[in-house]
Image (spheres, coloured by chain):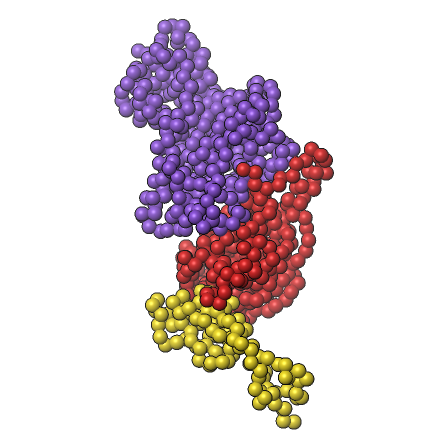
Amino acid sequence: MKADPKGVLTGEHYLDGDHACSEGALAAGCRFLAGYPITPSTEVAERIAERFPEVGGIFIQMEDEMGSMAAVIGAAWGGVKSMTVTSGPGFSLMMENIGLAAMMEAPCVVINVQRGGPSTGLPTLPGQADMMQARWGSHGDYEIIALAPNSPQECFELVIKAFNLSEQYRVPVLLMTDECVGHMTEKVVIPPADKIELYPRRYTKLPPSEYLPFKPGKDMIPEMVKAGDGYKIHITGLTHDEKGYPVMNWQAQEKLVRRLVDKIRLHEDQLLDVEETQMDDAQVVIFSYGISSRVSIPALQKARREGIKVGLLRSIICWPFPEKKIRELANKVKAFVVVEMNYGQMYFEVERCVAGKAKTLLVPHGGGWVHDPEDIYKAIKEAAK
Amino acid sequence: MAPPSMGKFWRKPLDSDKLEIPHGELHIIKERCKGCGFCVEYCPRDVLELASEYNSKGYHPPHVVKDDTCVFCGLCEMLCPEFAIYVTEKKKQKPPEQEVRKVES
Amino acid sequence: MNATQIAQATEIAEHPMEGLLRMDRIPHIWCSTCGIGTAVTSFAEALKKSTFPLEKVCVVSGIGCTGRVAGYIKLDSFHSTHGRAIPFATGLKLANPQLKLVVFSGDGDIAGIGGNHFIHAARRNMDLVVLCVNNFIYAMTGGQTAATTPLTANTSTSPYGNFEHPFNLCHLAESCGAVYVARWTALHVRRLARSISEALNKKGFSFIEIICPCSTLYARRNRLGSGLDLMKFYHDNSVIKHGADTRELGIEFQKKIIVGKFIDRERPTFLDSHNAWLKHRLQDKFVEHGGPEC
């Protein structure tokens, strides 16, 4: 289905990443945002607070992040596309309810504008150290989808993609930007509404007597309903059966939780989204995402001028991790140089998938500023030896 | 405090011929009962007592000890935490004449 | 289904409440002489007597013994995380203002971990009915001290007696802005059902505290007998005082309990204020959120 023109600010704009996220949400049909102010994500909510009254959305500034995430899930069951935005400390607080969203299979989007951590860290400076937390932050076994934009334009586009993925897979989708992309102002081109494709919510056509809230379809994903339509659903965070009723045994756990995990893992081919730069003849592969991928470009160009065959593999969907791609490349290339604004997070995934078939180097950075391309260049040279 | 006795009026009520005491029929779902005793304790007519028989869970469900005394007040149905007892109305009967007596002055 | 249809569907052959219960999950998990079942019966009674369409009623519970209520009621019911029933219900209500939201949860869930959400929802006058079962303890996890446990009571985390001062929930609700505040015990079945009816028909944040016996933990640990003995205690020691000053409603261990309807006032709800204010400021540019949009 196409986007509702009411929410689409078609045209060429000069927006920062946070504001581009707001416009992306509006274009995707998001009409509920519950959030709590936290630097550097607050601008997303601020713009939404201004724009929602013009398009019929509801914004509520909740009393804390736990309430925000709970309200987002409630709104999803109430029948609207809902979203929240936060940064590191708030992300940690939301974890329990992100697990609830995964268990209830509630479509929703959480934007984490990452900043320096841990704890209060560097509120106004970038970081990329929440990547593992995005994947493993809540307790128990579950899978989520996480995307990493590297420009305000991509912020706009990936928020729409995040909503579409959340509807398709009935899973919370995380948008892992960072303060640099969030506060960077660039040209953002917003297309007309009829050029924006949206994935409609998978409402069932079955009558209440036949509908089972957690009976999966062929793609392992159940159909959804919303509250108030007479289906008299029971939705719980306890391990449940297809009716939604809590069942306390290992068989129910195996049936439910394995499906929650498999519905993402077994769709990894469809969930592959990477951008390749000069990869055709690359012997050294830079693996990066978000702002660090842009900082890697001058290093790549300098290395290329010196004859090093280096390419950039930028991960747009970071979780599920592009495992197959890395395993394929590991057979062909000499080395991987992982550039991320942390002391090693996605690096371990790369290393795991490379499985010793190539060299893996990490160019770490504690956050607070972006990498010096010179450091990345030195690592490329080291890798090329 | 025990309720005042039904029959002691200082004069016969003007509508005594229209006076109808409701009567209830108790339905006890024995297997659901957990023997809490709320219904027994709070029945205003003491219609119920816990039986000596057990249900399959080992609880003593209530049973009616005073037939025809239930006045369909519905307290047992409202108080039962297990949805194990409810009352339906029996067809209405007029009270027998001797229930309405003059008080000896 | 409305109340008449339910009454017709549950003709004499079965318990009158069965149309509102998930009979495939009865018998429920609550202990013998627990008062939660009685509170649910009063709630079902209020629903049966209601005139609004029951498919628009949603029940949201948190975690705990009372938190299991959502699992037994045959309406759209949600069992969320500990303490987050109120914001979950907020999200549901704001997404679809046609829904009627009932939060049915325990004292630990609502006033302990959920305290922050409770006070803010009352402040904002969210259109919710909050039924708080107060058994003075965290029952499900084995009987720990709650924010409502009276002084000197014995719990598993205050084995020498509780020395912390408890909340006066009715006063808390009133001071935060609730528009309807009442307290009843599980014994006051009809008055409770009537209160719930009034709250369901009232717009704004309604709070009803339901004092319930907890037999296995509160009563047993404090040598108070069974839940039936606690009910007898409520019978002998509860005093009805409508309109009482909520400051005087504190509960001491095994002392008088004041019950009644204390607050019944009018205030604009969150959505009313939201729509009215933004309409005033934006005039024709304001688009009201009508309901589910996807």
| Outermost residue, bottom side | B105
Counting from the top left corner in percent of width and height, residue A134 is at 43, 33
Q: Quadrant of residue C283?
A: top right
Colour of the chain lettered B: yellow
Colour of the chain lettered A: purple
Q: Name the residue nearer the viewer: C192 or C6.
A: C6
Q: Residue at x 58, y 30 (%)?
A: A4
- State how many labels appear: 0
With respect to residue C97, does A179 lie above or below? above
* Residue A37 visible in rendering: no
With respect to residue A79, does C112 lie above or below? below
Counting from the top left corner in percent of width and height, residue B45 is at 51, 79
**A279 with respect to A356 (left or right):** right
Q: Quadrant of residue A40?
A: top right
Q: Name the residue nearer the viewer: A294 or A200.
A: A200
Counting from the top left corner in percent of width and height, residue C220 is at 42, 66
Colour of the chain lettered C: red
**A210 with respect to A36 (left or right):** left
